[in-house]
Image (cartoon, rainbow, N blue to C red):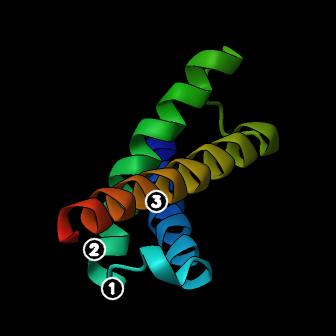
Amino acid sequence: MEQLIIQLISGAVGGNIAGALLKQFNLGVLINSIAGIVGGGIGGQILSSVLGTSGGMDIGGIISQVAGGGIGGAILLVIVGVIKQAMNK
């Protein structure tokens, strides 16, 4: 359970960082956070599966959970931003 919480929090942070850096995809703090949380959960689980890690609470496991969650959150935010831009055209 701790691993999922780390992934969700880092996903929210990753989504907001991506929104701040990529202004064209910024959807506001709330939507950035929601997209980041969902993407963080998905990205963290995918990275754990690909790396074959059990998601232990050692430093390597925590770093991979933070990385997977943050990257997953950022990627999903960009995908949602692209879809929103396409719908506005």
Indicate the amino acid at tag 2: Ile
Q: Callout 2: 10 Å neighbours few (<14), some, many (20+)?
A: some
Disc 3: which residue: 78
SS under mark 1: loop
Circles 3, 2 touching at the beta carbon (< 8 Å) = no
Circles 1, 2 touching at the beta carbon (< 8 Å) = yes
For marks 3 and 2, give the CA distance: 12 Å
Kindly report which numbered mark, 3 or 1, lies closer to the viewer in this rendering: 3
SS under mark 2: helix
Indicate the amino acid at tag 3: Val
Furthest-left residue in view? 87
SS under mark 3: helix
Query: Which quadrant of the figure has residue 27?
Result: bottom left
Q: Callout 1: 10 Å neighbours few (<14), some, many (20+)?
A: few
Kindly report which numbered mark, 3 or 2, lies closer to the viewer in this rendering: 3
Disc 1: which residue: 28
